[in-house]
């Protein structure tokens, strides 16, 4: 499936808009405590473990969004927006959401 942050796909014609689709992935607070416990993973001010977990959450959100687009009969998603939100009273969870417009292109 073609996915893009742009509103169109170069060389493709959108023949039908199928609807807005979204996917989310939520990571719990214990993950972050575990990550900070492994602070030795920091290299140059970056945590490889933390980055891998965020990448995994992003991939889950994008895949869920694409599954919903397929269910609508779409073969592409345009205008994708990725958002990161901290949830809970004490910032106990992180949500990654992917939103876009499911389309049929030729």
Image (tube, rainbow, N blue to C red):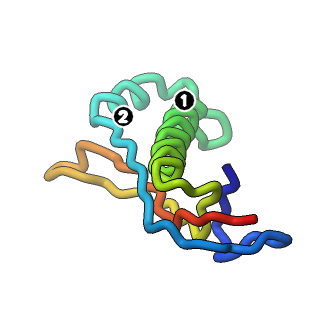
77 sits left or right of 14 in the view: left
As drawn, the residue found furthest toward the right would be 11
Earlier-in-chain disc, 2 versus 1:
2
Front in this rendered view, residue 104 or 92 = 104
Circle 1 residue? 49
User: Is there a contact, CB below 8 Å, between mark 2 and mark 1?
Assistant: no
Q: With respect to residue 26, does 105 lie above or below? A: below
Crowding near the residue tagged with mark 1, few <14, some 14–19, many ≥20 C-alpha atoms within 10 Å? some
Estimate the x, y position of residue 46 in percent, counting from the top left: 60, 41
Q: With respect to residue 40, does 62 lie above or below? A: below
Q: Residue at x 47, y 55 (%)?
A: 72
The kind of secondary structure element at disc 1 is helix
Image mark count: 2
Q: Quadrant of the C terminus?
A: bottom right
Crowding near the residue tagged with mark 2, few <14, some 14–19, many ≥20 C-alpha atoms within 10 Å? some
The kind of secondary structure element at disc 2 is helix
Estimate the x, y position of residue 10 in percent, counting from the top left: 82, 72
Q: Which mark is residue 41?
A: none
Estimate the x, y position of residue 89 in percent, counting from the top left: 14, 52
66 sits left or right of 8 in the view: left
Estimate the x, y position of residue 47 in percent, counting from the top left: 56, 36
Front in this rendered view, residue 15 or 28 = 15
Q: Residue at x 85, y 71 (%)?
A: 11
Q: Residue at x 53, y 35 (%)?
A: 56
Circle 2 residue? 32
Front in this rendered view, residue 87 or 4 = 4
12 sits left or right of 1 in the view: right
Spatial separation of the CA atoms under disc 2 and disc 1? 10 Å
83 sits left or right of 77 in the view: left
Q: Residue at x 36, y 34 (%)?
A: 32
Q: With respect to residue 24, does 47 lie above or below? A: above
Quadrant position of residue 8: bottom right
């Amino acid at each position: 499936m073609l996915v893009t942050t742009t509103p169109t796909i170069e060389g493709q014609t959108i023949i039908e808009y199928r609807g807005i689709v979204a996917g989310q992935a939520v990571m719990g607070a214990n993950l972050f405590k575990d990550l900070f416990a492994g602070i030795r993973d920091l290299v140059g001010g970056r945590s490889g473990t933390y980055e891998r977990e965020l990448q995994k959450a992003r991939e889950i959100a994008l895949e869920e969004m694409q599954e919903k687009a397929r269910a609508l009969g779409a073969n592409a998603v345009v205008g994708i927006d990725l958002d990161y939100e901290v949830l809970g009273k004490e910032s106990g969870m992180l949500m990654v959401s992917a939103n876009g417009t499911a389309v049929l292109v030729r």
